[in-house]
Amino acid sequence: MTTDFACYQRRLDRLAAQITESGVDGFLISHPVNVSYLTGFSGDSSYLLVGRQRLLLVSDGRFTQQLQEECPEVPVHIRPPSVRITDAAVERVNKLGWRSVGFEAARVSVEEFERFRELAPSVAWKPCRNLVETLRQCKDADEIQEIRQAVVMAERAFERFRLTLGREDSEKSLADRMEALVRAEGAVSSSFPIIMAISERSALPHCPPSPRQLDDAELLLVDWGACGRHYRSDLTRVLANRTISPQLREVWSAVLNAQQRAIEVLRPGIEAQAVDAAARAVLSEAGFGNYFTHALGHGIGREVHESPRLGAGITTVLQPGMVMTIEPGVYLPGWGGVRIEDDVLITEDGCEVLSRLGRTPDELVAAW
Ligand code: ZN
Ligand code: ZN
């Protein structure tokens, strides 16, 4: 499907505007997600060269037709099967006569960097950080719309999922079922490997699905999301079995209060670390400060973890168009954990919570 190239052109222009600032002749973009963000091409193994006036996507014969369909406006160089992508890209850099090239430091291996220098020894290779990631932080209207759809798909899957629980279900079978439900709601796949954590296993924030069965467990923590065409959602809810213990209620309400506090302070102009601190203060006051062991949230978009992170030491000033997760949690070893995660858009004057699933224990009782 061909999308209007104007949005990609705007992104390319913003990147090209950094060429002078970086003191290079052009950028070599190799992270497939960034190549896709800048061109609309959804394949991989293709490097994008962005100069002031020049644009070239170095790809291979597997993608010839897909390139024509997805980004017909982008000039393409198809390398022969005998030439590696790194070699083909450097050969083009030499042909363009670039003397200095910025590359994505986080995405290029030492082996590849050495090859750059071997094949183009006179070129100054300059490692750059977060070149495209910074552009990706603020989403445009189309991107926000795709994230909204990804949230809706995840929510619909959850509403169906919660009606299906049985005592014999294991974390593994539950994760597989949720994957199928997310896809049945229109997602390409889930956003990341789904987390299903039963009772004491929910004390592990990133618990891998095991054969553990629901049996008479008190709670089930579900961390899941939907990936639409390109954009992802990321949500967490805890489902409680009929009788909710006082301890579960206490932990749950502390986590919910922390989340609400963060959403109250989330607005343009605030530093990322201040939002994390606001939520953390609520949990500390409730006596759970030592049991909130991760950052409050992260950007979402084409990847499930994008910048900025909402955590201590992150001074990024939040801006309209950023879409963040807000996911405080309390994890008590041997007992279990509660995390509540929602996806929130920063607006001109505050924020909008994109996810609408209930958050209180009474709204999240399930029978198994
Ligand atoms: Zn999550
Ligand atoms: Zn998350």
Image: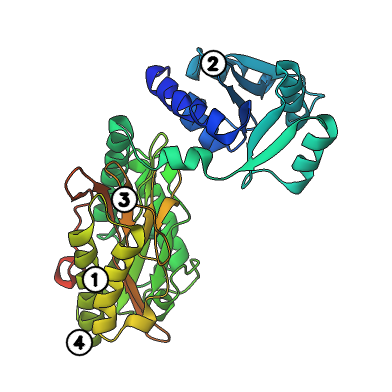
Q: Earlier in the sequence, mark 2 or mark 1?
A: 2
- The N terminus: image quadrant: top left
Asked which quadrant contains residue 228, the reply is: top left
- Which quarter of the frame holds ligand 2? bottom left
Q: Which residue is mark 1?
A: 258
Q: Earlier in the sequence, mark 1 or mark 4?
A: 4
Secondary structure, mark 3, is loop
Q: Vertical placement of 206 versus 251: above or below?
A: above
Question: How many C-alpha atoms fall within 10 Å of the one at disc 2: few (<14), some, or many (≥20)?
Answer: some
The reply, left or right, for residue 213 in relation to residue 356 is right
The residue carrying pointer 4 sits among few (fewer than 14), some (14 to 19) or many (20 or more) residues within 10 Å by Cα, namely few
Q: Earlier in the sequence, mark 3 or mark 1?
A: 1
Between 230 and 193, the one nearer to me in the picture: 230
Is disc 3 surrounded by few (<14), some (14 to 19) or many (20+) residues within 10 Å? many
Q: CA distance from mark 2 to mark 3?
A: 32 Å
Kindly identify which numbered label has been placed on residue 74.
2
* C-alpha distance separating marks 4 and 3: 37 Å
Report the disc number at residue 318: 3
Comparing labels 3 and 1, the label whose residue is closer to the camera: 3
Q: Amino acid at mark 4?
A: Pro
